[in-house]
Amino acid sequence: MSKSKFIDAAVAVAVVASAIWAFPGFAEDVKRYTSADQLQPPCTIVSIDAYWDGGTKAGRIVDSVGGVLEFCLDGRLEGAASAGLSEQGRMQPRSFYVGGAYPTDLGTRELVVGGDEERKLIDVITAWVEEEVPLVKFDSVRAAYRDCRNSQQRESVVRQNGLSESQARALLVESVIIRRERF
């Protein structure tokens, strides 16, 4: 990097830092929610990620007024062990968390499995998925995506059906969040 480019970059960083210092609310303009009950539909899921700790899924929802709710579905290996088996021998549902992208993030709170707030979160997610890939129109695509066993197969379904990035994200969300299946 040339000396003049380095100086230009340093000046740009100084200007941004000064603006944040001079206007403390500047970086805080986004409404950060701590509860699914705060969401104002319609909402959009703008990101979905997975951690390789056993499969914790993290997402970010933006609502109709620009508020943001981070959430995650616990997939930690110790979470799987503590969830245990139901009386019927099936794995118990894993917990959703809101307020952060990982269960142990500061300010992240566990939702009661089957509780009102969990139902609200699932309803918001489900409504967005149905908006992006309506069951009436995409039933066979949704079924084919659910049958995929790896990311290459998922990418193939998306490509063969000419789906947008948002529609592909909706299929992933349906598979791993709503159905609580493995990535």
Image: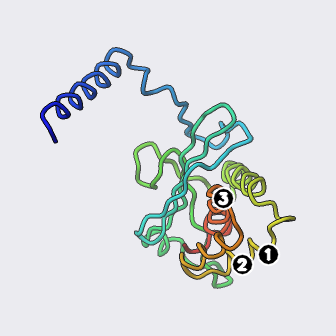
The residue singled out by tag 1 in the image is: 140
Kind of residue at disc 2: Ala
Residue 161, picture quadrant: bottom right
Mark 2 and mark 1 residues within 8 Å of each other at the beta carbon: yes
Which is more foreground, mark 2 or mark 3? 3
Of residues 58 and 75, the one drawn nearer to the viewer in this rendering: 58
Is residue 169 placed above or below 67 in the rendered structure? below
- For the point 66% across and 74% down, which residue is it? 157
Is residue 46 placed above or below 86 in the rendered structure? above
Residues at marks 3 and 1, CA–CA distance in whole angstroms: 17 Å
The residue singled out by tag 2 in the image is: 144
Dot 1: element: helix
- For the point 45% across and 27% down, which residue is it? 28
User: On the rendered image, what quadrant is the N terminus found in?
Assistant: top left
Of residues 19 and 61, the one drawn nearer to the viewer in this rendering: 19
Q: Of the two numbered discs 2 and 3 on the same chain, state the one appearing first in sequence.
A: 2
The residue singled out by tag 3 in the image is: 164
Of residues 133 and 61, the one drawn nearer to the viewer in this rendering: 133
Dot 2: element: helix
